[in-house]
Amino acid sequence: MNTPYKSAAQIDDLIHQMIDQLNTLLAERQISNPLMIGIHTGGVWLAERLHHQMQLKEPLGTLDIAFYRDDFTRIGMNPQVRPSHLPVAVDDRHIILVDDVLQTGRTIRAALNEIFDYGRPASIILATLVERSGRELPIEPDVVGICPELAPENHITLTGPDPLGLIIKESKHSPS
Amino acid sequence: MIIPNQSNIQLDAQGRLKHFLTIDGLNQELLTEILDTAESFAGVSERTVKKVPMLRGKIITNLFFETSTRTRTTFELAAKRLSADVLSLNISASSTSKGETLLDTLRNLEAMHCDMFVVRHADSGAAHFIAQHAAPHISVINAGDGRHAHPTQAMLDMFTIRRHKGDFSPLKVAIVGDIQHSRVARSQILALNTLGVAEVRIIGPATLMPVHAETLGVKVFHSLEEGIQDVDVVIMLRLQRERMSGALLPSEHEYYQLYGLTDKRLEGAKPDAIVMHPGPINRGVEMDSQVADGPRSVILQQVSYGIAIRMAVMAMAMQRQGGAQ
């Protein structure tokens, strides 16, 4: 069963909060002209909005981490792998990595590995719309929209691309 | 060697690719999935680290009973870009009972815990035979068997066509040369028709045409000038020199006079037509050097795309491995 959790307008508010946090963090770290990279699919939807509203100069990069998943031989390949596209070299750049939901940390682990196969960035900031319990790796976000209290069997998903919505699904399977 | 019912041995219970032996029996959806997956892999070649970790810890064995440089190298490179460990064996086909030799070789390789065999063999059906007799966890990819099939070559050709032309449905494609003996042509015709091109033409002398060629879903032409009119894609096949001895062709020179692709002959095709060749080219036999090196030639792109296609097929065939479905 799917339960609506946040509407498009509420997500807009969360995005504004995230932009404030990001700007503060970038100022603290004296980073100008960062490179934003969204993780397919939800992370890209979110990154498109952040990228647009923050008026970042560099084009948005996208990552599909399908080739880097650690469960490839168990669950197989997603037939709809979208090519990763990093339009600007990542070497020595400050990167803002954007994803929709942070849970186990495995997606971010895969994304970090993929980014390092493109080059050696100066730093990476992790921004996620949702942070929830269930971490399996030592990965923490720098910027978060919302941290809902969720039971392990509840699965939170970003729907989109337009309008965006957050829904909660009750699932028997443990998410990855 | 008997070629068994091809439609299901290639797919697992969920309809996913387990072996890749022939285009026959695979639907448009699956062929498109191969092309889409290859599209993602094509980007890997442009990165600093030209490798993804998908098949780390897997062992892929190139089992080449027939010599080949390009195909073997691109399969090897594809496997390495997926982080697999690769063994390349060149086993020249012996005159002894091939069934026995094959099985013995197979058991030995299984004992080395190989996960995938890439097979090239002069006998039609060899890859099927190996797929049938290999341990259940092993995937088999056909890298060319006799006159039967060369499905990865056909798919890299489809990939090249899609990259240049986008949509398959309006296209007229001409395949020129020795259709009768060409596993490449056979696989290309199947793939082009499955992907729904408007028209497939085969062009060549009557002695190099299969009997009942029309049943393959193609239009047959014996004149290059006629057949090439208004086509979007011209695929030249390699003329296998050994055919000359069988009196099927008078001479290379005469073949070139009639079927060699020159700039002049290419004028009949659409202005934006591309020229393809699976390689290796016999310059001055199948085509003029000016065409081979000319602006419409995409022959070297075919080689690069071959790596992406082979990565896609290997990754798709291996995804079902590892136990739990």
Image (cartoon, coloured by chain):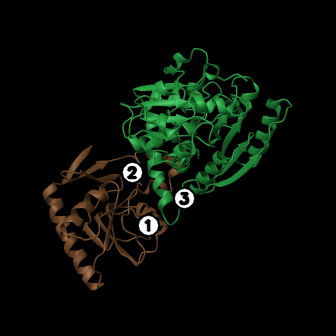
Chain colours: A brown, B green
Chain-order first, disc 1 or disc 2:
2
| Residue drawn at x 50%, y 32% as measured from the top left | B15
Q: Is residue B45 visible?
A: yes
Q: Residues within 10 Å of mark 3 (few under 14, many from 20)?
A: some
Looking at this view, name the residue that lies furthest to the top. B212
Residue B154, how many percent across, how many down?
54, 36
| Residue drawn at x 46%, y 71% as measured from the top left | A119
What is the spatial separation of the Cα atoms under label 3 and label 1, in whole angstroms?
Answer: 13 Å
Q: Chain of mark 2?
A: A
Q: Residues within 10 Å of mark 2 (few under 14, many from 20)?
A: some
| Residue drawn at x 21%, y 62% as measured from the top left | A49
Q: Secondary structure at mark 2?
A: loop
Q: Chain of mark 3?
A: B
Say if labels 2 and 3 share a chain.
Answer: no
Q: Quadrant of residue A115?
A: bottom left
Q: Chain of mark 1?
A: A
Quadrant containing the N terminus of chain A is: top left
Q: Quadrant of residue A13?
A: bottom left
Q: Is B3 in front, or is B216?
A: B216
Q: Which residue is mark 2?
A: A82
Marker disc for residue B53:
3
